[in-house]
Image (tube, rainbow, N blue to C red):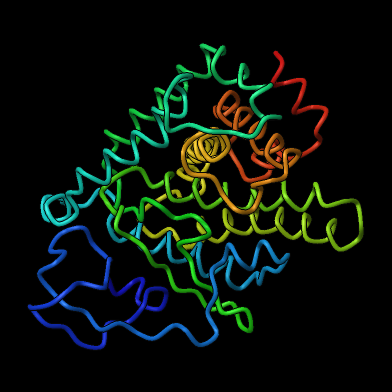
Amino acid sequence: MKSSQATVPNPTSSSRTGTCVCIMGPRGLGQFRFIMEDLSDGYVTLQAELIRGKLHLAAVRNIAVFMACVHSATHNRSQNGLLTSFSNPDMVSLTEQYIFTRPYLKDDPTNHSSEPIKAILHLVYDDMELQSIVGKFKGLFLEKQESLVHGDLHSGSILVRPEDGSVKVIDAEFAYIGPSALDLGLLLASYVFSYCAHKEKGNDAESRMFCELLCQAIQLTGETYNAHLTSQKDAALYFSQLMPEVAGFAGCELIRRIIGAAHVADVEGCPGAEERALRAGIWLLKNHQTVTSPTVFLICLQPDKLMLNMVKQ
């Protein structure tokens, strides 16, 4: 797609025989060979940078522009062709199971969590309101055909060049026609995980500064995405109505990465960070209707006392 060429690996040649090594698009795997741009020189995953406590705000902007351009170019257009090209039932089913279903089943054998988290699992399993809200977002994920979404846009699916903030988005095998808020929610959850990890490292100046930078990244993502939407007559109104969905999807991602099958390296092995992330996810889901801006979104991170009180209600 022309609108996102700068932020995906460039194909240099292709053939109808051989093994497919390009995973942009779910159809035709195994039918073509793609020789892709070599990104080994200077690019690292965004997740690796976040774990190191590094983040270039130019990368934050570039990721947000990528999402806005792809979503705008495919937003509620005549989608018969897109729906066919990006029909992806197997991966959609996988996502539905491991983000929206299995993590909320107390006895599901794929779930696992640390011992400190096991002590507070009742916050998820015994909260029928929370379970109902998760069901709502499962329905949105399965039914809302709004735009072409990456479908798995976490920090491990984004390569960044630290020197200048250049970005390449990879691993789009989960791409399908779905809710635009899904991509935004998964991405913001990655920033939340990083915030929780660095907040638990201590109260030193470096950790505090990086946590502040992550809050800026969440704000900047929203502002940049909003500024580059071209499919909406009133982008600001649309974005304020989109943010509750963003909050809900972010909440689902945060919870499932703490108690479900697939965890994240950012907080793994740090019970304090895991608990922060879990409580942030619960807050975002239970308060998603009030989250109409990135500023309100940030309440899930601070102040902790307010968040804890809201979770206990």
Task: Tell me the quadrant of the picture where the N terminus can be found.
Answer: bottom left
**Residue 134: percent from the left, percent from the top?**
45, 25
Q: Is 101 left, or right, of 271 in this rendering?
A: left
Q: How many circles with numbers are drawn on the protein? A: 0
Q: Nearer the viewer, residue 265 or 286?
A: 265
Q: Is 310 left, or right, of 8 in this rendering?
A: right
Q: Nearer the viewer, residue 28 or 136?
A: 28
At a point 42% along the width and 36% down the height, the residue shown is 99
Q: Nearer the viewer, residue 36 or 57?
A: 36
Task: Tell me the quadrant of the picture where the C terminus can be found.
Answer: top right
**Residue 269: percent from the left, percent from the top?**
68, 46
At a point 80% along the width and 33% down the height, the residue shown is 304
Q: Is residue 287 placed above or below 65 in the rendered structure?
A: above
**Residue 237: percent from the left, percent from the top?**
49, 42
Q: Is 5 left, or right, of 47 in this rendering?
A: left
**Residue 300: percent from the left, percent from the top?**
69, 36
At a point 53% along the width and 59% down the height, the residue shown is 155
Q: Is 15 left, or right, of 115 in this rendering?
A: left
- The residue lying furthest to the right in this view is 204
At a point 61% along the width and 82% down the height, the residue shown is 164
